[in-house]
Image (cartoon, rainbow, N blue to C red):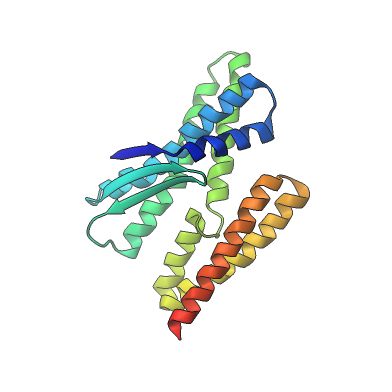
């Protein structure tokens, strides 16, 4: 298994860190936590893919992490399992850190709780039915199993709508950086839906 880290990944980690805190120590901690959390998420995909003999490579990029795999074609259910393992590993990691936090001094507890919080939020965010997040891919698999290519096309259309609504909520009420990212997701989903519709014709 090959793991590479793009220089742009550090830019993403710093952007997220400085949006949450201004303390140099806290920023450094955030960057390390983002690195570990994204890597564990991608290991969920990679290790489960290797169970079916896939060759995998993990790359940490400006948009998070990407696990590419090569090998014999897998069934939709196998693909579903591999994709679902990313958020699952995130939740399990959060649970592990939460259990450890119960036995540490109060001063350390706050730092560990931040790890738990980041992994739970990141895993939940990743399950939103928006492409290219895992939730969007899972939605495409489910709709594809029931409705074929029409279902996959609809997954892109619904992804564009959900992404732009979520982006609006983030920009207005919470985090403009995440909002801008979801605006990009919405644009890319709409373009994918349009391309898929043109191929149908």
79 w.r.t. 41: above or below:
below
Does residue 148 appear to the left or right of 14 in the view shown?
left
In the rendered image, the quadrant that contains the N terminus is: top left
Q: Position of residue 151 (x, y in %)?
A: 47, 74
Q: Residue at the spot x=44%, y=39% of the render?
A: 6
Q: Quadrant of residue 15?
A: top right
Is residue 110 in sight in this rendering? no
Whole-percent x, y for residue 186 in the image: 60, 62
Tell me what residue is drawn at x 56 percent, y 32 percent. 116
In the image, residue 131 sits, relative to residue 21, either above or below, namely below
In front: 23, or 128? 23
Rendered view: 182 above or below 43:
below
Q: Is residue 157 left or right of residue 180?
A: left
Extreme residue toward the right, this view: 172
- Image quadrant containing the C terminus: bottom left
Residue 23 placed where, x, y %? 68, 22
Q: Residue at x 42, y 48 (%)?
A: 66
The total number of labels drawn is: 0
- Tell which residue pokes out farthest to the front in this image: 7
In this orientation, does residue 38 appear?
Answer: yes
Depth check: 17 or 109 in front?
Answer: 17
């Amino acid at each position: 298994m090959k793991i590479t880290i793009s220089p742009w990944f550090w830019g993403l980690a710093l952007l997220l860190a400085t949006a949450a805190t201004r303390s140099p120590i806290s920023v450094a901690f955030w960057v390390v936590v983002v690195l570990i959390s994204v890597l564990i998420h991608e290991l969920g995909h990679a290790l489960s893919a290797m169970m079916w003999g896939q060759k995998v490579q993990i790359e940490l990029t400006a948009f998070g992490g990407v696990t590419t795999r090569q090998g014999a074609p897998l069934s939709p259910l196998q693909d579903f399992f591999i994709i679902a393992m990313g958020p699952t590993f995130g939740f399990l990691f959060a649970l592990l850190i939460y259990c450890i936090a119960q036995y540490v001094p109060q001063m350390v507890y706050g730092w560990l709780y931040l790890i738990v919080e980041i992994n739970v939020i990141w895993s939940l965010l990743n399950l939103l039915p928006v492409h290219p997040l895992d939730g969007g891919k899972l939605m495409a698999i489910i709709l594809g199993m029931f409705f074929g290519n029409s279902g996959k096309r609809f997954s892109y259309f619904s992804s564009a709508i959900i992404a732009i609504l979520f982006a609006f909520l983030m920009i207005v009420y919470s985090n403009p950086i995440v909002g801008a990212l979801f605006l990009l997701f919405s644009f890319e989903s709409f373009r994918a839906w349009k391309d898929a519709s043109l191929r149908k014709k």
